[in-house]
Amino acid sequence: MSRLAHILDQLTRAGELYESLPDKALRCCACGHRCLIKEGRRGICQVRFNRDGQIRVPWGYVAALQADPIEKKPFFHLLPGSTALTFGMLGCDFHCNYCQNWLSSQAMRDPASDISIRYIREITPEQVIEAARQANASAMVSSYNEPLITSEWALAIFRLAKEAGMKCAYVSNGNLTPEVLAYLTPYLDAYKIDLKSMQDKNYRKLGGVLQNILDGIRLTHDAGLLVEVVTLVVPGFNDSNEELWETARFLTGISPDIPWHVTAFHKSYKMTDPDNTSPATLLRAAEIGREAGLRYVYAGNLPGRTGEYEDTFCPNCNRSLVQRTGYIIHSYQLGENGTCPNCGTGISGIWPGEPGQVHLEGPGRPFLV
Ligand code: SF4
């Protein structure tokens, strides 16, 4: 066993998201893989395992803790201009070969990521809340690795965060189950899902199943959460007009109010062949989204190079409501409860109660806490 595995196995406790099976086997339901785990074995994510017929789950540490502009998640319809205290652990249920956070996410799956041992910092949920207070955070977000696989830990933090008046959110691949969603929903306000492709064969390469993600988007929306969807547009992987149209039509079919972020790929981890996404490709994707009927389409990762696609407009009168560059808000013109000041149309989202308090021209970058 590697040193990393030894340490992570100690930073665990009994979990809740599983079903007992005969012969001390169990079935985990924290993510769509629904691993059947025999005694002494691990799930696909490696960080959840069966000890004596009980599931052990990650607990009591973070591998990253950072105060981020909420726009970095990206959430554009959740308290714009606010700070999101963001925590992550180690491990993932996917193995995307372009992952930007692979040192954290591929822990125990790729030996090259064993140096992530350095990131481990033992902490209690109470201390995470205290860090949020110090950072003046309005939102608590689980991100960086896949939050679904560490949902018991996230829930312990979210319970306290809700008591402290914060909004809580997941930044996730969307490979969820109805059970984990029901477990989280009382404490969750918003859910960002990556819709990486509309081709199941592409999802299989990343370690997932397309239908699980499509179901995840529908389920989170039906549960009443604010759902924002991100598609990282990778040249040659998912950037054909046909596939972008299919993605946009799927989202419109659930709700034209779902914000869709098309974001630029930069060479990373094992995916170094495709070119970085050009502004022209990103604009083509964004235009398809708008033409398909989505009301809020954003182009990300190329700040200042995609024109109006960083801003929010009223879908009724086209008034510019929020102007952004990257993670910085330049102007915020929504009224109380997120209404257009020109025509009164309600804009879907979770908006600040006091529009005058929105932080304009912030630093636009994260800081460690
Ligand atoms: S979280 Fe997913 S990958 Fe991990 S053990 Fe549970 S079902 Fe398997």
Image (tube, grey):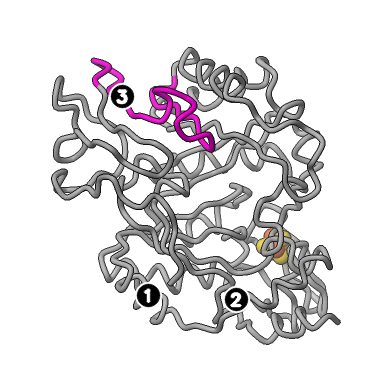
Span colored in magenta = 294-319
Q: Position of residue 54 (x, y in %)?
A: 69, 80
* Quarter of the image where the C terminus is located: bottom left
Is residue 206 rendered magenta in the image?
no
Q: Name which residue type carries label 1.
A: Ala
Q: Which mark is residue 15?
A: 2
State the residue lying farthest toward the top. 291
Residue at numbered disc 3: 313
SS state under label 2: loop
Q: Residue sitting at 14 percent across and 40 percent down?
A: 336
Q: Is residue 151 above or below residue 170?
A: below
Q: Position of residue 76 (x, y in %)?
A: 38, 40
Task: Pick whichever, 35 or 101, lies toward us.
Answer: 101
Q: Name which residue type carries label 3.
A: Phe
Task: Pick whichever, 92 or 328, lies toward us.
Answer: 328
Q: Is residue 261 above or below residue 290?
A: below
Q: Residue sitting at 81 percent across and 42 percent down?
A: 205
Q: Nearer the viewer, mark 2 or mark 3?
A: 3
Mark 1–mark 2 Cα distance, whole angstroms, equals: 25 Å
Q: Name which residue type carries label 2.
A: Gly
- Name the dominant secondary structure of the magenta segment: loop
Mark 3–mark 1 Cα distance, whole angstroms, equals: 34 Å
Residue at numbered disc 1: 131
The answer to whether mark 1 is within 8 Å of ligand 1 is no
Q: Residue sitting at 76 percent across and 26 percent down?
A: 236
